[in-house]
Image: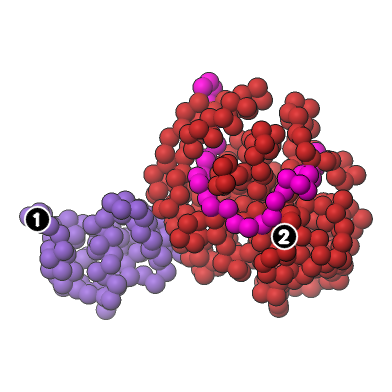
Chain colours: A red, B purple
């Protein structure tokens, strides 16, 4: 476990905190983000509700995002309130003994709100580094992006993001590495050997939570974006095809995180269109079996 | 009804983005969340509407921009403008 007062970086932020962290990367450059606890918000405080959700595969707990001054308040069932000031930036976490899961929640919506304020874009996607450039995996359905990302890690490629990918839309779009974690299903963990990673946390759930070895994490310097691969299921064999920009926008839009405001929809649309215009987007049809994972990695490296 | 005398402007609730060369562009209607693909000529028309103009002016300017404009240019443009108007992407100025 990494634990000190200046523990490292995530999504390009240099973390400043006295709290324990498990998934940070090296380096200390970048905008400082303050992380503290505990948040003290009573449940009867009201504000404009921007988002509300019921449990789903992506967000397994109910929650709501409320506008606050400054920033936002995020309520997550059983956890309580996260206070997020993206401008400072500063995130205050609820008190809990389960610091591993709390950190995972931190690197989800709270971190997204902070890097959106910085001008970056959030995609519900995994990302890995291949020959110094980032390949992003989006799964419009539930088609194994985390498992494939784990297979890339097992094959020696650096994992940049497991679930939320931060994309910077400069002239050459970049991926800003996120937390160095992998959360894979137990059945996958039993079949796929994941080297250079350590289980963390003590609370059992449907996933094995792994922290990647610090020596392999690298830092949060942005990595040029080589391609976006949309994962599709095929009964047999591999097939990859380019996705026209206008169709790619539809898929990237569905993978993007945005607030329900005109300004944020416009920001997100502009970013997604710019990504679709400047980065190759592929549909990858591949068998969804564990034994085909190494071949899938090889196929992506060669073709995407 | 769109006629040559109609004066149009863009709906400010629409965000446009050009795609790659020869790929045209996309328009997002913020209120509905629907987006619409347009070809390169449609994108050119969208650019000409920027300041607000009459349809007749727009057609004249487009004719200057297009190499070998087809005889059906005016009809084609009117048809395009009726579609984008129906989709609330442009507004008829009173």
Q: Secondary structure at mark 2?
A: loop
Q: Residue at x 58, y 53 (%)?
A: A223
**Most distant residue in the left direction:** B71
Cα distance, mark 2 to mark 1? 59 Å
**What residue would you read off at disc 2?**
A27
Marks 2, 1 in one chain: no
Residue A187 vs residue B7, the one in the foreground? A187
Instruction: Chain letter for mark 1, please.
Output: B
The reply to whether residue A125 is in sight is yes
Q: Give the magenta-colored segment's residue range.
A: A208-237
Above or below: residue A195 compared with residue A95: above
Q: Secondary structure at mark 1?
A: loop
Above or below: residue B90 compared with residue A3: below
Q: Residue at x 19, y 60 (%)?
A: B78
The reply to whether residue A62 is in sight is no
Instruction: Chain letter for mark 2, please.
Output: A
Residue A265 vs residue A139, the one in the foreground? A139
Q: Residue at x 63, y 28 (%)?
A: A293
**What residue would you read off at disc 1?**
B68
Task: Specify few, some or many for label 1: CA neighbours under 10 Å numbering under 14, 14-19, or 20 or more.
Answer: few
Residue A150 vs residue B51, the one in the foreground? A150
């Amino acid at each position: 476990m990494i634990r000190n007062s200046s523990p490292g970086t995530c999504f390009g932020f240099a973390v400043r905190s006295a709290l324990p962290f498990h998934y940070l990367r090296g380096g200390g450059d970048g905008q400082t983000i303050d992380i503290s606890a505990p948040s003290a918000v009573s449940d009867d405080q009201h504000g404009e509700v921007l988002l509300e959700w019921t449990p789903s595969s992506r967000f397994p707990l109910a929650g709501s995002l409320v506008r606050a001054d400054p920033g936002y308040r995020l309520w997550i069932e059983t956890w309580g309130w996260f206070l997020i000031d993206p401008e400072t930036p500063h995130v205050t976490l609820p008190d809990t003994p389960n610091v591993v899961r709390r950190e995972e929640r931190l690197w989800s919506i709270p971190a997204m709100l902070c890097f959106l304020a910085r001008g970056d874009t959030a995609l519900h996607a995994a990302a890995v580094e291949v020959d110094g450039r980032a390949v992003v995996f989006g799964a419009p359905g539930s088609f194994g992006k985390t498992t494939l990302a784990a297979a890339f890690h097992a094959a020696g490629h650096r994992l940049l993001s497991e679930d939320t990918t931060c994309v910077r839309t400069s002239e050459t779009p970049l991926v800003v590495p996120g937390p160095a974690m992998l959360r894979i299903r137990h059945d996958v963990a039993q079949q796929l050997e994941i080297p250079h990673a350590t289980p963390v946390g003590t609370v059992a759930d449907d996933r094995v939570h792994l922290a990647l070895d610090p020596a392999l994490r690298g830092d949060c310097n942005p990595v040029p974006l080589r391609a976006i691969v949309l994962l599709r299921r095929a009964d047999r064999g591999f097939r990859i095809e380019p996705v026209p920009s206008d169709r790619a926008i539809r898929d990237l839009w569905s993978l993007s995180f945005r607030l329900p405001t005109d300004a944020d929809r416009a920001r997100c649309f502009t970013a997604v269109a710019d990504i679709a215009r400047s980065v190759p987007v592929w549909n990858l049809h591949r068998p969804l079996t564990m034994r085909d994972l190494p071949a899938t990695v090889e196929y992506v490296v060669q073709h995407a | 009804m769109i006629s040559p005398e109609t004066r149009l402007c863009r709906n400010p609730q629409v965000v446009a983005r050009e795609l790659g060369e020869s790929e045209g562009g996309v328009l997002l209607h913020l209120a509905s969340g629907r987006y619409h693909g347009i070809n390169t000529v449609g994108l050119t028309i969208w650019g000409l509407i920027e300041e607000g103009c009459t349809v007749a002016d727009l057609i004249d300017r487009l004719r200057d921009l297009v190499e070998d404009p087809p005889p059906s240019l005016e009809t084609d443009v009117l048809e395009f403008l009726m579609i984008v108007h129906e989709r609330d992407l442009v507004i008829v100025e009173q």
